[in-house]
Image: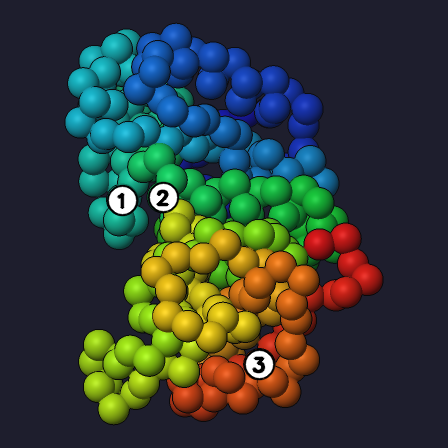
Amino acid sequence: MLGLKRGAVALYPHEKAWETEAQATMARLRHILGPVAVEMAHVGSTAIPTIQAKPIIDIAVAVDDFDALLAYEKQLRAAGFYYRPNAQAGVRGQLLFASGSYYDGSGDLQTHFIHIVRTGSVDWQNYILFRDYLCTHPDTAGEYERLKLALAAQLPTDSGREDYVQGKQSFIRSVLRRALSDMLLGKMVDILIDRPLGSHHPKHTDMIYPVNYGYVPYIFSADGEEADVYLLGVSQPVEKYKGRVIAVIHRLDDVEDKWIAAPTGVTFPPDEIEKAVNFQEQYFQHEIEMLDPNGDQ
């Protein structure tokens, strides 16, 4: 089955045909867009084989330039992809194209959503992170399915889709935080230091950084900003550093997490990490997740 009446909320068991259709759709898009489409992926629930989904195919397309993409609007429309300039007014940094008989005027079905995002953006990262985490964590995927089924049972009417979407957001945010932890813990990262050891906080000038503090370019936290990192074990100010992520600080009363990096082969116990970051983390409820020394990361 493919397609759902606009505004309706209904879930169906996964079908292998959805992946086939997604691949065919991406081939059509690549033929039209050529090199303008930098990356492309089947995302959303129809890309997760273990859960039920609305039978609408979601494709994410990463481009460097929205205007370059919109230059192909006529060709996309001729191929059945209709630009919806007001459909995602609340979603910053994305464009939406949609397919189905509702859009060509021959019926009332929506079959495809094409999400246009910027290359290397938090939107692209999150589409891929969420899909991959659920594909590799079946228990979490099952939680998501149960949540979706409960919401669909509560909101089955035409007016329920927006509430259905909003009802998933808290779960999606929590999964993205876990997925980012999985992605970074134990990995080597390039850190750009924008607040070196001994510098003052740009707003709270009485706060002096006792460690180097920066961010990982092109890796985004839940607040949409690049992931912040405390660099421990480096006793002089630096502008950039390649270090290993050894821990994550989960802020329980904030949307973002903070990462702890150190030189290769160097680690710190939780109490030393707590002491090193207390100058800033004392203002937040938090817990520290350490890299498992016996794990695969």
**CB atoms at circles 1 and 3 under 8 Å apart?**
no
**Residue type, label 1:** Gly
Disc number for residue 121 = 2
Residue located beneath label 1 in the image: 93
Q: Could you say where residue 236 lies in the image, as x and y percent from the top left?
A: 41, 72
Q: Nearer the viewer, residue 196 or 161?
A: 196
Pick the residue in front: 92 or 81: 92
Q: Is residue 171 visible?
A: no
What's the CA distance linking mark 1 and mark 3? Answer: 36 Å
The residue tagged 3 is 273
User: Callout 3: 10 Å neighbours few (<14), some, many (20+)?
Assistant: some
- Residue 50 as seen in the image, left or right of residue 47: right
Of the image marks 2 and 1, the number of the one nearer the N terminus: 1
Identify the mark at residue 34; answer none if there is no mark. none
Reply above or below: 204 against 10. Answer: below
| Residues at discs 2 and 1 in contact (Cβ within 8 Å) | yes
x then y, percent, for residue 80: 34, 15
The amino acid on which the numbered mark 3 sits, given as a three-letter code, is Ile
